[in-house]
Image (cartoon, rainbow, N blue to C red):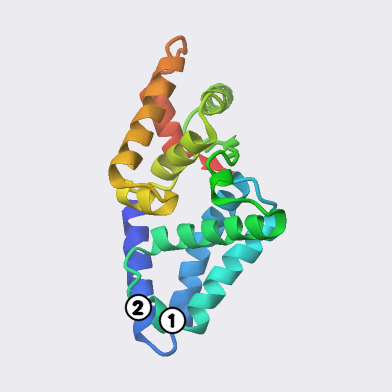
Amino acid sequence: MQEKNKHIAIDNCWKEFLANKDGYDAFSFIYDSYVHDLLSYGVNLGFDEDTCRDAVHDVFCKILSDKNKFLNVNNLTSYLFRAVRNYLFNFQKKNHNLSDSSFENIPFFTEVTTLESLIDREDTEKLKQTVENLLNQLTPRQREVVYLRYMQEMDYEEIAVLMEINYNSARRLVHRSIEHLRSVNKDSEKPLFVILVALTYYHYL
């Protein structure tokens, strides 16, 4: 419920920002709501923090400087993640002369930090290690899609747009990633649903 209320608040602020000449308070709320997740996503893609900050600031500065260009942006979450991703990939191509195909297997790193209030400290550490070990069994692309689906709670359409694949491919990629997690998790004392809860409520840095 809290997450749903947050999304409603963000949607309302986005509409307020676009509709009003002076919407700086609404814009500030939107920035604060997304900056950490966008930075974490960029770092997980393998970029250094300074480059990620440049990407995030560039995206928000463009929105602030000419909001009229963004009147048709209805899904702000999808747009922001895609814009930051494109900035970082374009930066990489420009500085390292890479082709688009080079990004198919770009590393996607995850490190789990837990909310210790959910379970006791000892069990928290065990679950953290289990989640990290399982994620390391996935390909970079699978880790990214699991991150987007469970950590960022994106739907398949948003994932498809962000990763530049079609809707059915996004669904299959998520399904195959979870099936792979299930197959390598057979001997664990933690059932897969516990792992998915951990992915939903834990943060990646």
Residue at 42% x, 12% y is 186
Q: Farthest residue to the bottom: give it.
A: 21
> Neighbour class for label 1 at 10 Å: few (<14), some, many (≥20)?
some
Question: What residue is shown with label 1?
Answer: 67
Mark 2 residue type: Leu
Would residue 186 be found to the left or right of residue 55 on screen? Answer: left
> Neighbour class for label 2 at 10 Å: few (<14), some, many (≥20)?
few
From mark 2 to mark 1, how far is it between C-alphas? 7 Å
Residue at 31% x, 54% y is 4
Eyeballing the image, is 145 above or below 190?
Answer: below
As helix, strand or loop, the secondary structure at mark 1 comes to helix
Eyeballing the image, is 53 above or below 63?
Answer: above
As helix, strand or loop, the secondary structure at mark 2 comes to loop
Residue at 46% x, 16% y is 184
Give the x, y percent position of residue 118: 46, 34
Q: Farthest residue to the top: give it.
A: 187
Give the x, y percent position of residue 106: 59, 41
Eyeballing the image, is 182 above or below 153?
Answer: above
Q: Which image quarter: residue 93?
A: bottom right
Figure disc tally:
2
Q: Label 1 near label 2: C-beta < 8 Å? A: yes
Would residue 70 be found to the left or right of residue 85 on screen? Answer: left
Mark 1 residue type: Lys
Give the x, y percent position of residue 174: 37, 35
Would residue 18 be found to the left or right of residue 89 on screen? Answer: left
Question: What residue is shown with label 2?
Answer: 71
Mark sitting on residue 19: none
Q: Which image quarter: residue 204?
A: top right
Residue at 47% x, 83% y is 66
Give the x, y percent position of residue 86: 53, 59
Eyeballing the image, is 65 above or below 141?
Answer: below
